[in-house]
Image (tube, rainbow, N blue to C red):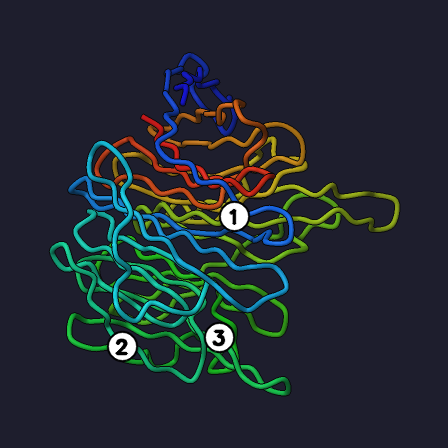
Amino acid sequence: MKFVTVLVLLLAVCGADMSATRVATWRLTYAVRGLTGEMASTEFGAIGATGRGQAWALLERSRRESSSRSWTMLRWDGLSWRPTALPKGVKGSNAEFAASPSGDDLWMFTGDRPFQLTGDRWVHRPWASRFARESVAVGAKDDVWISEYGGPDDYSGSGLSHWDGGSWKPVPESSPYGDHDWVSRVAAPDRGEVWAVAHSQGVATVIRRDSSGWVTTPLPPAPGCPPSPAGGFYGMAARAHDDVWLVTQSRSERSGSCELPGRGMVARWDGTAWTWLDLPLTATWLPAVRADRVGGVWIAVNPAHGQSYVLNFRDGRWTRSTLPAEGGWAGFVDIVPVPGTTRLWALARRVDGTLLIYELD
């Protein structure tokens, strides 16, 4: 493996300080090739980290034209990634990790099965709901939120569950609109506070809940023509009650005489209002946004052409770090900051199915 040092280019947008530059290093720490030919498969996965330097990765491989699925779990020992035994009861799909802002509580989800890292052991925390897991957030130790969505073809419903350290409890009136909404995203910057994206009759609304109840925070129409996002919200992150981020996608389409190219779009809450940021993201896909109190906000960017990169917003400045080009094009599957640091773990996938784990430091 060759380690490639990438010069981080400053992205001068949104009032960023144009004199600010920094050098970051991508380091390839793990690679596993995908299956080919008749045994070809689709590879997915997720990665999580604690504030104590622990890191875990869960790699999912499902064979094409088959329902069979296999998992590989890895643990970072400080020097390398090593295979480790799967916790008992892991099943389903759509793996996801979620950590508290301080990194003192890490959770893993497979299907509708939550696991909490306790010491060095993953403990299953059984969760029962009428619906399926949609999104998760950890605000503090034993302060975990799950948004839920599902129902038969002629009916859909949603809910919100909360882990208080002893059990999962349904949250009454999970949004100002009642039980028929889709709560697609949740984020939690601290204990007792949760943000959510609620959908009602095709309209998305951002809401916030604390000890006083739910409050709506209106989101203005997105820039462009037509002036609204054509896709759903694919990511949400919260650093504080006055620093919340959303990413969405605008698909290429025409409206009258104007055309809106497909692009990623980013909105930020500053404590008073939501603002759509003017970022050069034409022909891009944004698979993840993550926030850390020290490392700032990280946005994974997969462009239609060219190498994938991450944008980092910290101390009022934007920087851009591009994945190494060795081995061919690779797109991000997941990213996660190491809580309390400026380091980042990234899980990427090449077109040949090879899964890669990089560290940015």
Determine the residue positioned at 48% across, 45% down: 333
Determine the residue positioned at 45% across, 25% down: 321
Within-10-Å neighbours for mark 3: few <14, some 14–19, many 20+: many
Quadrant (top left, top right, bottom left, bottom right) of the N terminus: top left
* Residue at mark 2: 126
**Residue 14 in the image: x percent, y percent?**
50, 29
User: Is 258 left, or right, of 75 in this rendering?
Assistant: right
Quadrant (top left, top right, bottom left, bottom right) of the C terminus: top left
Q: Amino acid at mark 1?
A: Val
Of the residues tagged 2 and 3, which is closer to the observer?
2
Q: CA distance from mark 1 to mark 2?
A: 30 Å
User: Is 175 left, or right, of 98 in this rendering?
Assistant: right
**Residue 285 in the image: x percent, y percent?**
59, 43
**Residue 118 in the image: x percent, y percent?**
14, 60
* Residue at mark 3: 149
Within-10-Å neighbours for mark 2: few <14, some 14–19, many 20+: few
Q: Is residue 205 above or below residue 1?
A: below
* Residue at mark 1: 247
Of the residues tagged 1 and 3, which is closer to the observer?
3
Contact? badges 2 and 3 (CB < 8 Å): no
Secondary structure category for the residue under label 1: strand
Contact? badges 1 and 2 (CB < 8 Å): no
In the figure, residue 211 lies in which quadrant? bottom left
Q: CA distance from mark 2 to mark 3?
A: 18 Å
Along the polypeptide, which appears first: circle 1 or circle 2? Answer: 2
Determine the residue positioned at 31% across, 46% down: 239
Front residue (pair 70, 338): 70
Q: CA distance from mark 1 to mark 3?
A: 20 Å
